[in-house]
Amino acid sequence: MPHTDAHHAYWDDTQLSALIDALVARGWYVGERFIDSDLCRELRDELHMLHQRQALQEAGIGRGDERTLRRDIRGDAIHWLDRESLAQRRYLALMNELQQQINVALYLGLFEFEAHFAHYPPGAFYRKHYDSFRGRANRVVSTVLYLNADWPADGGGEMALFDEYETEREVSRIRPEAGTFACFLSDRIPHEVLPTRLPRTSIAGWFRRNASLGGVVDPAH
């Protein structure tokens, strides 16, 4: 599994190879116990604190002037990672290392990583969608780290991934257990979050290309 300390982050070669091979072969990867359990607990505690302080923002759909709140489509609340805690910095260091390794292996030109905490209250879901659109893809690889300890089999809240070409065919259903890490090609793999029975916590992230236009880095689209 990945190893971290305050100054260094690196990945197990076997897991890294499996992740890269899966992205090439099918466009998605899921690894259980991929992130250290202590780091997951620290991130979960931070998200719980943000929730208690009412510091989470209802998530919308669309970007820029097109952003709207649609609880019939998406029911989570979020807080963007801002490097304010050691746990965030440790996780972002891991993602920076992963970004470099993916670029070396796949020449994707990933430019940066953005991520937010996500809290789904009981009953919440996120309808099937893509994280980016072909021809307008600044988000290239999507990631999800789950933070929920001892998630029960009947807890709901799984993420369903669908085939790139047969988009009604489910290819994986991911239980949101702490330490499980999923990644997939943002503009090719449709996915959805099924209704959860319990409060569900995660970190959603995206490796991005620099889609600068007219001197503005990654303008809203």
Image (cartoon, helix red, strand yellow):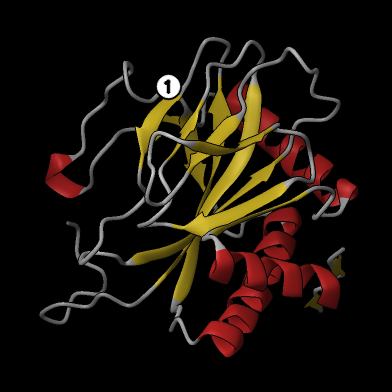
Quadrant of the rendering where the C terminus is positioned = bottom left
Q: Nearest the camera: 142 or 9?
A: 142
Q: Is residue 49 visible?
A: no
Q: Is residue 201 visible?
A: yes
Q: Picture coordinates of residue 19 (x, y %)? A: 68, 66
User: Would you place residue 142 above or below residue 74 in this image?
Assistant: below
With 58 as the anchor, is 43 left or right in this view?
right
Count of marks placed on residues: 1
Q: Picture coordinates of residue 62 (x, y %)? A: 23, 42
Q: Picture coordinates of residue 142 (x, y %)? A: 49, 56
Quadrant of the rendering where the N terminus is positioned = bottom right
Residue identifier under label 1: 75
At x 46%, y 73%, the residue is: 112
Badge 1: few (under 14), some or many (20 or more) residues near its Cα, within 10 Å? many
Among the 4 quarters of the image, the one containing residue 96: bottom right
User: Would you place residue 91 above or below residue 215 in this image?
Assistant: above
Q: Picture coordinates of residue 208 (x, y %)? A: 41, 69
At x 74%, y 75%, the residue is: 17
User: Would you place residue 90 above or below residue 76 in this image?
Assistant: below
